[in-house]
Image (tube, grey):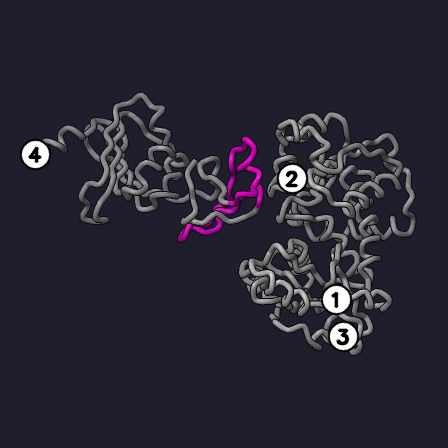
Amino acid sequence: MKDKMLEVSAIENGTVIDHIPPKAFFKVIAILGLEKLDIQMTLGTNLDSKKIGKKAIVKLSDIFFPDKDVNKIALVAPQAKLNIIKNYNVVEKRVVEIPDDIVGIVKCMNPKCITNSEKIITKFKVVSKNEVKLKCLYCEKITDQDNMQVI
Amino acid sequence: MKNKSLVSITDFSKSDYLRILELAEDYERKPVQDLLTGKVVATLFFEPSTRTRLSFESAVNKMGGRVIGFTDASSSSVTKGETLYDTIKIVCNYCDLIVMRHPLEGSARFASEISSVPIINAGDGANQHPTQTLLDLYSIKKTQGKLDNLTIFMVGDLKYGRTVHSLLMAMSQFNPTFHFISPDELKMPEEYKIFLRTLGIKYYEHKDFTDIITEADIIYMTRVQKERFSDPIEYERTKNAYVLKNKMLNNTKENLRVLHPLPRVNEIDQDVDINPKAYYFTQALNGVYIRQAIISSILGLN
């Protein structure tokens, strides 16, 4: 049964994002804009993982993301691993890294920030990466990991 | 600095500040200068602020410019549901410079991104009010003859008071020693203390407003606001514990000056007003000179 499942989900060419924490699963989907892509994809969550207990995985055929796009998921899934697949083989393994600037993914947690009342693309400077802290370039307030809401 | 918006105190460098302070001295010597003839400055006050607006308008008038604008949101198209984006996009067609005060934080930065003319932030919520900070710097320099190595006491609401936070950031470039006097509920936020520690600047925190002020070169008083307290009894008790009275100034330094961003309620007793060390009303006058200097720097008139 296990083998059969793997067979179904194996891809010929594309990107596999593994070790996504299940609670970050839908945020990763949103950040990568997967709902807008018309490619073959296999999504799974709450799968058993030796490393993190339960995990989610995303397998995307025939798509390779630039670093700057895929690094955005580090905000919600810093331990995620990327496998680049070519001809059914893993040709490259990558880790995601939090970028220095975040544009348009996160909502500023300050209810009095102008970005929460006008149509504005949010902009943040990442001031801490270990425990993620984002400084809003508009209101200058910090949005921390616990209060981070993906738009 | 020409054509650059002034949104946050960190937008300008130390040399920019010093240049504006020098320019303000020129305006103090000669306040009436016809530099703004034919220029229009818009003052958009989405929330009222009498002193700030009047000092800007006075500054423009003294330089021969004209002022258009509104004094609170109820007399603007905001009541019809217009966005800030649209208001700025339209008003920037009508003027050479926009001075704005808005209750939402980050509004001035946003306006500076979409406006075709420079923006001066006259206060965006609890965030920034850079022209206040510059007039505070000017008042300190004028009364002390220098900005370096001063001992500055900040008293009252140090948690929410944006003026003390901006002044702390600006003065930190001049090797000060800070003393913070406040109730526990209104202590200086940790982020500013971390900032001072990384720069190696000395600061001391006190709960009681006592004779330690004898060390002060500057006492910067702030208003303890009622809405910061959930318990009204606690507010009454706190409010009365941080009041400066004339007799408290008895053994203080000769060069000491008392500053306050105003409006005051009761935190400086009226009996202090006659003391030559009381400087807050002159401080408000300095606001006109500093705003003349800021406007002319941004419009490149000097």
Mark 1 and mark 2 on one chain: yes
- Left/right of residue A149 with respect to residue A54 in the rendered view: right
Disc sitting over residue A45 in the figure: none
Q: Is residue B258 left or right of residue A42?
A: right
Image spot of residue B281 (x, y percent): 83, 57
- Label 4, residues with CA under 10 Å away: few <14, some 14-19, many ≥20: few
Q: Say which residue appears at 71% left-offset and 44% top-offset.
A: B122
Quadrant for residue B2, please give it: top right
Q: Residues within 10 Å of mark 2 (few under 14, many from 20)?
A: many
Residue A20 picture location, percent across and down: 28, 42
Give the residue at mark 3: B248
Provide the chain ID for the residue under circle 2. Answer: B
Q: Is residue B257 magenta?
A: no
Q: CA distance from mark 1 to mark 2?
A: 30 Å
Query: Taking B207 as reference, is A145 above or below it?
Result: above
Viewer-closest of B30 and A46: A46
Residue type (three-letter) at the residue carrying disc 1: Ile
Q: Using residue B107 as the reference point, say whether residue A79 is left or right of it.
A: left
- Of marks 2 and 3, which one's residue comes earlier in the chain? 2
Give the labeled residue for mark 4.
A1
Q: Secondary structure at mark 1?
A: strand
Region of the chain picked out in magenta, as a range? A110-139
